[in-house]
Image (cartoon, grey):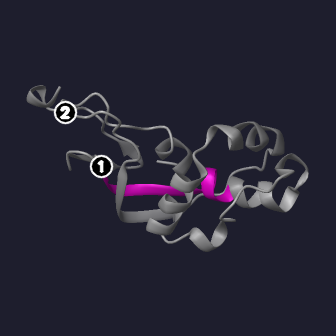
Amino acid sequence: MKLLTHNFLSSKCLKRVNVGFPLGIVPKEVQEVKMDFNAEFISKMVPKVDWDVLCAAAETVGHLNDLPRTVSPQFENDEEFLRKAHHVLLEIELISGELVCPETGVTFPVSDGIPNMLANEDEV
């Protein structure tokens, strides 16, 4: 699961959950998977990402040093910033571990890079 994906997931479908964001990450295996850099795509994604949540996720999986802590004011024209954002958003992958609801503590397994966000029947 890419950290970009993590930034958009929530556990709001669970009972007793008002926000369900951000999900905690309990990493077991994290890999770097190289992808072609696409400045236009990253430029469009940066405004949609909760940057503080991305920084927290990057720190949890051991890659905060790869990411600027704030968004560059003119990020669209800052190739170094865009490349660092690309790296953390698209090349750092949670292969296995768990995602944890911040309100209930319910866990969702991540296996082979795929988060299983299905809840038990009594939780929805």
Q: Which residue lies at the image location 70% right of the left edge and 53% below the top edge?
A: 86
Q: Amino acid at mark 1?
A: Pro
Q: Where residue 39 is drawn, which disc sits there?
A: none
Give the x, y percent position of residue 29. 39, 64
User: In percent of the image, x 50 and y 72: which residue is there?
Assistant: 62
Q: Which residue is mark 2?
A: 16
Pointer 1 local density, CA inside 10 Å: few below 14, some 14–19, many at least 20 = some
- Name the image quarter holding residue 4: top right
Which label's residue is closer to the chain start, 1 or 2?
2
* Circles 1 and 2: CB atoms closer than 8 Å: no
Q: Nearer the viewer, residue 102 or 42?
A: 102
Q: Position of residue 120 (x, y in %)?
A: 14, 32
Q: Which amino acid, by three-letter code, is at mark 2?
A: Arg
62 on left or right of 42: left
Q: Nearer the viewer, residue 68 or 113?
A: 68
Residue at 44% x, 56% y is 94
What secondary structure predominates along the stretch shown in magenta? strand
- Residue that appears at 28% across and 27% down: 13
- Judging by the rendered image, the residue that carries numbered circle 1 is 102
Query: Dividing the image into 4 quarters, which one contains the C terminus?
Result: top left
Residue 35 is situated, as x and y percent measured from the top left of the image, at 69, 51
- Within 10 angstroms of label 2, few (less than 14), some, or many (20 or more) residues? few
In the shown orientation, is residue 29 left or right of residue 41? left
Magenta highlight range: 87-99
Q: In this rendering, does residue 61 appear at all? A: no
